[in-house]
Amino acid sequence: MRRLILTAAALGAAVLVSSGCGDSAAAPATYDSALDTASRSQQAPTVAMLEALVNIESGPGDAVGLAQMGDYLAGQLVALGATVTRHKAADGTPGDNIVGTLRGTGTRHILLMAHMDTVYPRGFLKDAPFRVDGNRAYGPGIADDKGGIAVILNTLALLNARSFREYGTLTVLFNTDEETGSFGSRELIQSLSASHDYVLSHEPSAASQESFGLATSGIAHATATIRGRASHAGVAPELGVNALTEAAALILRTQDIDNKDREIRFNWTLASAGSASNAIPAVATLTADMRYGRNQDLDAITAMLNERAQQKRLPEAEITIDVLRGRPAFNASEGGQALAARGQSIYNEVGGRIEISNVRIGGGSDAAYAALSGKPVLEGMGLPGAGYHTNADEYIMIDAIPRRLYLGARMIMDLSLGR
Ligand SMILES: [Zn+2]
């Protein structure tokens, strides 16, 4: 919708402006019936591709499967006209992160992401083969995240079919290690996101309630190493410094770091100490699971933990704290929220209903790494499904495929054209 606004600077001249700048308001309804029809025709090829993707087992660290998947995806991208580059994981995870690049005639740079790894070990497929039953297509990893891959590749096929090339750069990233924290691909995600204007991440959405999630928790782990001094527990316990006693005291004096109201969760989850029942333990180690809603809070939690560590019950004990940072917190920026509103509006055009959720999810996604760039990021562009990360049968909703392809194609077209 457009509206007339008179400004003083315009000296009485009527200035026609959009009711919102290109990125901060949902696009007006612009139903594209040709795209709708084409998206419906693309359903069967998408289901066929899902079968091919499910039949390549690509569990965590599966060198054979990830290599096979990388070759398949590179082949698909080349067939769509993309230039493909391969990027080894920074941490030695097997397989290649696959990047496909399409250069267009426009100026906007858009990054599409999905991950090729699943949580299922090799052999799982034998007992849970691909199958279609009514409106559901089943298979290990079919929702998370083979559905995301299929949406991206079939969206590109739709854009090619209508010779749409008005983007500047359209880049596709398929990474190998999302399920294990993306330690080997996070730098690649961050650098690609920084060089693009928009990031669309294709994780699945719950079939029971489709949604774009605007917030996920940051994750970190703290390890406390407590060093004391061994001594015979029966003969001369007072000559020892009991690392286990100090560890127990550390647990108690850090209880108040957990602060649910501030979206900070801090819980000790692993402990070990001692080597024999008759020896004062010289060493103890503790591990804490840390979750946070705001990235600046991680430094505050770490400082609080270090300060508490030095308030020792046994002065001779030594405590060192190591914090391993996992995914940062994701909080959709204004630009990201505008993408969600736009997506919701486009989805409505073809009968789709999708909620925009502010409820913070405890688990993370690669959207969090992408968002460190400050660029607008939208998560949840994959297929609606269920049963992922469980031993229940994982499936996607087949009738959602056309509307998801329509959504994917229209998002790229609108963002490319500055609509
Ligand atoms: Zn996933």
Image (cartoon, grey):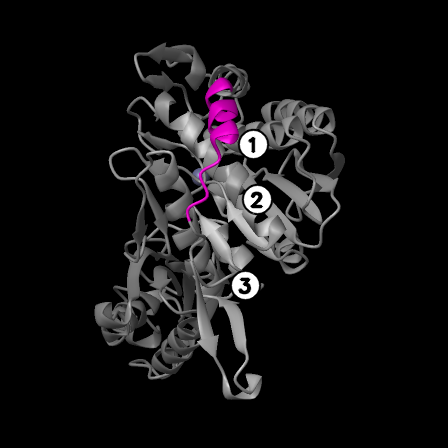
Mark positioned earlier in the residue sequence (2 or 3): 3
Mark positioned earlier in the residue sequence (1 or 2): 1
- Residue 245 screen position, x and y as percent: 27, 69
| SS of the residue under disc 2 | helix
User: In front here: 11 or 252?
Assistant: 11
Asked whether the viewer can see residue 59, the reply is: no
CA gap between label 3 and label 1 equals 26 Å
Instruction: Please name the residue shown 75% across and 46% down the image.
Output: 105
Mark positioned earlier in the residue sequence (3 or 1): 1
CA gap between label 2 and label 3 equals 21 Å
Asked whether the viewer can see residue 38, the reply is: yes
- Residue picked out by circle 2: 412
Alpha-carbon neighbours of circle 1 within 10 Å: few (<14), some, or many (≥20)?
many
Q: Does residue 36 show up magenta in the picture?
A: yes
The amino acid pointed to by label 3 is Leu
Q: Does residue 223 show up magenta in the picture?
A: no
| SS of the residue under disc 3 | loop
Residues at marks 1 and 2 touching, judged by CB atoms closer than 8 Å: yes
Between tags 3 and 1, which lies in front? 1
- Residue picked out by circle 1: 155
- Residue 156 screen position, x and y as percent: 61, 32
Tag of residue 372: 3
> Where the N terminus falls, by quadrant?
bottom left
- Residue 375 screen position, x and y as percent: 56, 62
The amino acid pointed to by label 1 is Thr
In the rendered view, does 372 fall on the left or right side of 313? Answer: right
| SS of the residue under disc 1 | helix
